[in-house]
Image (tube, helix red, strand yellow):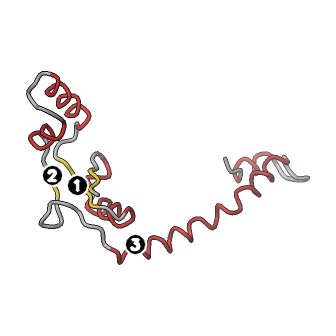
């Protein structure tokens, strides 16, 4: 599977490689920044008969600008994936207490607790 990405995350080689690693897919970064406008122009070109279909239009109107391999794609690497999975598990742990914090917040201020202090520490 090949996943094209663009805009903010596509500007960073680090982020695109992280996407490839965590999603375990090839990533392609197309040229240009106004991809929505390009898509509209491609659709108009198909309607006007310039292109026969989307496949032909994309082959002619879109090119890949960044590559980290000979195929023009950013290839997933299994090495960092295990580390990302480990970090994801560590990041999920604090969210286990989220229901407890929500119940605590719903109870209102405790005796001798100022509203100002409560607002600072409240979770939204």
Residue at point 26% right, 56% down?
A: 2
Q: Nearer the viewer, residue 124 or 34?
A: 34
Residue at point 28% right, 50% down?
A: 5
Q: CA distance from mark 3 to mark 1?
A: 19 Å
Residue at point 18% right, 28% down?
A: 41
Q: Which residue is mark 1?
A: 28
Q: Earlier in the sequence, mark 1 or mark 2?
A: 1
Q: Nearer the viewer, residue 111 or 23?
A: 23
Which disc number belongs to residue 81? 3
Q: CA distance from mark 1 to mark 2?
A: 6 Å
Q: CA distance from mark 2 to mark 3?
A: 25 Å
Q: Which quarter of the figure has residue 81?
A: bottom left
Q: Secondary structure at mark 1?
A: strand
Total numbered labels: 3
Q: Residue furthest front?
A: 52
Q: Which quarter of the figure has residue 12?
A: bottom left
Q: Earlier in the sequence, mark 2 or mark 3?
A: 2
Q: Which quarter of the figure has residue 89?
A: bottom right
* Residue 42 image point, x, y percent: 17, 31
Asked if labels 2 and 1 touch by Cβ distance under 8 angstroms, the answer is yes
Q: Nearer the viewer, residue 36 or 8?
A: 36
**Quadrant of the drawing holding the N terminus:** bottom left
Q: Taking 32 as reference, is 28 above or below it?
A: below
Q: Which residue is mark 2?
A: 64
Q: Is residue 52 left or right of residue 33?
A: left
Q: Residues within 10 Å of mark 2 (few under 14, many from 20)?
A: some
Q: Secondary structure at mark 2?
A: strand
Q: Secondary structure at mark 3?
A: helix
* Residue 6 image point, x, y percent: 27, 47
């Amino acid at each position: 599977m090949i996943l094209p990405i663009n805009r903010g995350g596509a500007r960073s080689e680090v982020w695109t490689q992280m996407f490839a690693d965590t999603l375990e897919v090839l990533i392609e970064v197309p040229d240009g920044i106004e991809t929505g406008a390009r898509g509209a122009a491609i659709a108009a070109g198909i309607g006007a008969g310039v292109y026969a279909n989307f496949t032909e239009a994309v082959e002619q109107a879109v090119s890949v600008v960044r590559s980290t391999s000979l195929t023009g794609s950013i290839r997933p690497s299994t090495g960092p994936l295990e580390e990302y999975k480990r970090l994801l598990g560590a990041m999920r742990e604090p969210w286990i207490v989220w229901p407890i914090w929500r119940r605590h917040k719903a109870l209102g201020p405790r005796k001798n607790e100022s509203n100002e202090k409560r607002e600072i520490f409240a979770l939204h």
